[in-house]
Amino acid sequence: MTASSVDAKLDWNEVWRSRMETSTALKRNKGCSDFWNDSKRARSRAASSTGDDCERVAWVTSSLPVTPEARILDIGAGAGAIAVPLSRRAAAVTAVEPARAMREVMEQAVREAGIGNITIVGRHWEETDPERDLDPPYDVVFASFSLGMPDLRAAIEKMNAVCSGTVAVFHFAGLPYWEQVMLDTWPALHGVAYLPGPKADVIFNLLYQMGIYPDVSVSSYEHRLSVPDLDAGVDALGGRLLVETPGQEDTLREYLAACLIEEDDGLVLKHRVHRACIRWEPHPSGGA
């Protein structure tokens, strides 16, 4: 992604909004926060993300300029997989998370760890009032795979307004594993084509139109969905794929039977994921 690639004729905020509105997963699952407002899903997500050695958590935390004096704002904090380890390295963390089930898991983790410097705000970012709900300015403001806002320009402007240091967003540069599965199976499961959500290129182009010239780094990793057997694979993916009938279960089971690789401890679905870290300073110091 380079500055020369930006099409100035497009309104990139509308491109984002349109792709969010037409995204099959978001439409059928009624948005990200509704999907994760489920206790079983929230616990499962927390179990897969906890620990400082988690690859995703390590990548995000190492990409942020955190100091012992830093005050951090985590937008779409989920179950606290990133907020909790950051709280051990920073002065304070404010975690904004709209899904009640996710907040409850995070609150339990905070209590059990005896952490006293995390403040949890139970709102969507669009509904968050900086004067009422926050205590700006923050040294670091970030959103890690949580940009579910249809009006991305307004979301970014609010991030900039409450930040005195670095803003960072982490988003997919290509299809995550679950979208690849949806792309492959949705027509057979639901009789319509799957339409993916917007990716990091739209964010970059929007920022450039806003006069923000971010640092962008793209990396990849191999996602591994491990399950003990085929039935467990159907159970793991069935909810996200909105599988409800025996026929849909058979379709998903047939797909997984062809894709899962047998290893010593069970079956594994492997997918190469490309992701981007997009960082900028909303109020840069110094001259050109």
Image: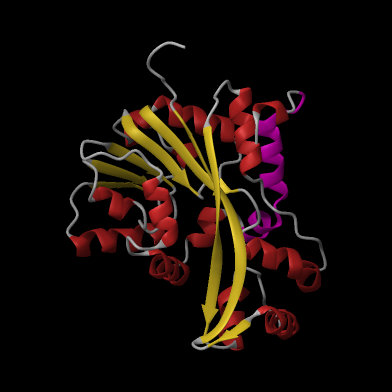
Residue closer to the observer: 272 or 109: 272
Above or below, 143 against 250 in this view is above
Predominant secondary structure in magenta?
helix
Residue at the extreme top: 287
| Residue 93 appears in view | yes
Q: Which residue is drawn at 63% across and 30% down?
A: 206
Indicate the quadrant where residue 213 lies: top right
Indicate the quadrant where residue 247 lies: bottom right
In the image, residue 112 lies at what x, y percent? 21, 65
Give the extent of the magenta segment: 9-29
Give the colour scheme shown: secondary structure
Screen quadrant of the N terminus: top right
In the image, residue 45 lies at what x, y percent? 44, 66
Above or below, 42 against 145 in this view is below
In the image, residue 86 lies at what x, y percent? 29, 49
Residue closer to the observer: 136 or 221: 221
Q: Residue at x 38, y 59 (%)?
A: 79
In the image, residue 207 lies at what x, y percent? 58, 29
Q: Along the horizontal axis of the image, is 18 left or right of 29?
A: right
Q: Along the horizontal axis of the image, is 179 left or right of 154?
A: right
Above or below, 216 against 52 in this view is above
| Residue 97 appears in view | no
Q: How many marks?
A: 0
Above or below, 44 against 70 in this view is below
* Residue 25 covered by magenta stretch: yes
Indicate the quadrant where residue 84 lies: bottom left
* Residue 187 covered by magenta stretch: no
